[in-house]
Amino acid sequence: MAGYDHYWFATERRVTREVRVGGIGIGGGNPIRLQSMITCDTMDTAACIRQTLDLVAAGCELVRITAPTVKDARNLEAIKAGLLARRCDVPLVADIHFKPEAALEAANWVEKVRVNPGNFADSKKFATREYSNAEYDAEIGRIRKRFGPLVEKCKARGIAMRIGTNHGSLSDRIMNRYGDTPLGMVESALEFARLAREQGYHDFVFSMKASNPKVMIAAYRLLVARLEAEGPDWNYPIHLGVTEAGDGEDGRIKSAIGIGSLLHDGIGDTIRVSLTEDSIHEIPVARALVAAIERSNPQNPESKIDRDAFSYRRRPSATIRAGDVALGGEETMRVVVRQQTFDQLAHKLDRMGDYQPEIVLEQANLLEIDPRDSDALVAAQNTAEVRFVTIPDGCDLDVISAYRLLAARLDARHPILLKDVFAPDASADFLPALLRAATNLGSLLCDGIGDAVLVQSLTGAGPHHPANAPGQSLRLAYNILQAAGARIFKTDYVACPSCGRTLFDLQSTTARIKAVTAHLKGVRLAIMGCIVNGPGEMADADFGYVGGAPGKVNLYVGRQAVKFNIPEAEAVDRLLDLIREHGKWVDAPRDAVAG
């Protein structure tokens, strides 16, 4: 795990240089900054000003605005002037895809420009070819000519840049050499960073965004390791985000897994939570994630652990039985509940479909071990019996560090039960409890640790608490397993947040699609407002619903567009027809209930 050892048990945030963006600093000794993005048409000046002011009032510190054309980029001048007239000097970030000319225009009016290396100077065709070293170098030379003028303008004006790689929009050149991988994401960003450094420009921030938290976590970790290997002057700040996270509880869980786990590792200087909702709702989630890491105290009980932090591999263990179910080994991740929760749900288990309590904690014959207790670990090593192991409540280590240490020191044959907290707090608000559970459990699952999960932070909530509904902790456990890719029990959605590029109403469309597909267990659907991240970010999706033009939708099977320019009013029905054509459709059960 060279290059990442000291982040595995982070005791402090990664040290970076400061990058100034208008009146605020990113990295250095500054707090973690909160970002969001307005969703209206960039040519609607009044709406852009209004949404920006609303975001600032909610606590947003940087506001991103899409600039898909030179005309849109030019209107950033009016938006900036209108904000200043209202005494709002929040830094604006121009979001650029495909058009270097738009970036050059936007750089006249904003404090930061975001470029995506995958499409800034490339037209993605999903072409397969081999590049010789000479041909590859020639491609870099072509990018230098396209990217160099923007670097020069940003340097001259003293404005910042984000070099933001998206998993879904890697260039054909990168895909052919590195594949659709975290390594490809990192190399794509480093190419642009080297070109910027050639011109003596250093005011940039990196990001490695993906809709799959495992891919996102691996890419950021690999990026940090590569930056450290390059040398101490590569200490650039990091922007964190899970792109296309979706909406509601699922979107918040996915964001917490990706962002929260990296913040725990000491990585991240600015964050954006991308929800398919009005962007003002992103800020409380972002604030809660930052507050949680500021309150936590990751310890460093052991600094060297033989662990691959850059790829997923489930911790091996033996298979045992707990009651009527098998766990460990290659068995599915199990869900554990307390007896009290089971008793509350017992009368409707036959109507709960796949939301089933599988193991009752009090009947699981658990062995509790503090990972610092060498005598207990030796005893577990020497016993012939395979035991179901967890960490006792009241342990004074933080959850992630504790389970990482346990997984490293415990005999691998013993399966592990993950708990989201060691000290349940009945007074906790629901959102922080949800985000804490998702961060702790999801991070460990993405590390390959754990054979079963127990959400206990919601146990014992008061009578008027949102968590008091029977099955809330059970549903949350299943949703965390799904978001971490550890267990698929329902339809999986990749849904982008709205922005000025969106060609249909994402929120209402997503709700309509979910209403008729939510029973399709294991089917992955992508709902994309435009083509920017569409085909690429749908790499793992079975079907895609993508805005192709105003009022028109293109339908995809995987990355391949198969239906074009479908009127929006017909598009959901045509999507269902497509699912039927490919044998993925089943009728919804009439009596299923959740939680």
Image (cartoon, helix red, strand yellow):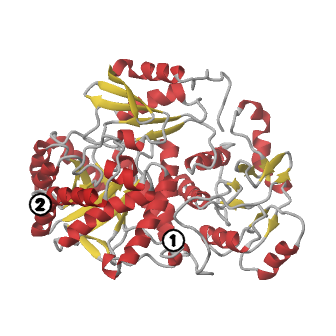
Q: Is residue 409 visible?
A: yes
What's the residue at 66%, 23% (across, down)?
589
> Looking at the rendering, in which quadrant would you find the C terminus?
top right
What's the residue at 28%, 53% (across, down)?
116
The quarter holding residue 72 reads: top left
Mark 2 surroundings: few (<14), some (14-19) or many (≥20) residues within 10 A = some
Work out whether mark 1 precedes mark 2 in sequence or the reverse, and give the earlier one: 2
Can you say whether 69 is above or below 134 in the image? above
How far apart are labels 1 and 2 at the CA level?
A: 43 Å
Q: Is residue 87 visible?
A: no
Compare residues 149 and 345 and report the one nearer the observer. Answer: 149
Count of numbered tags: 2
Can you say whether 441 is above or below 545 in the image? below
Q: Please state the horizontal and vertical placement of residue 190, each as a whole percent of the image.
A: 32, 65
Q: Give the side of residue 41 with respect to residue 27, left or right.
A: left
Q: Please state the horizontal and vertical placement of residue 132, each as a whole percent of the image.
A: 31, 57
Q: Give the side of residue 26 with respect to residue 464, left or right.
A: left
The quarter holding residue 449 reads: bottom right
> Looking at the rendering, in which quadrant would you find the N terminus?
bottom right
Hey, what amino acid is under mark 1? Arg
SS assignment at label 2? helix
Residue furthest to the right in view is: 384
Can you say whether 183 is above or below 212 in the image? below
Return the mark for residue 549. Answer: none
Return the mark for residue 149. Answer: 2
Q: Give the side of residue 526 with respect to residue 582, left or right.
A: left
Q: Nearer the viewer, mark 1 or mark 2?
A: 2
Return the mark for residue 295. Answer: 1
SS assignment at label 1? helix
Q: Please state the horizontal and vertical placement of residue 363, each as a whole percent of the image.
A: 86, 54
Q: Please state the horizontal and vertical placement of residue 501, each as a whole percent of the image.
A: 26, 39
Hey, what amino acid is under mark 2? Pro
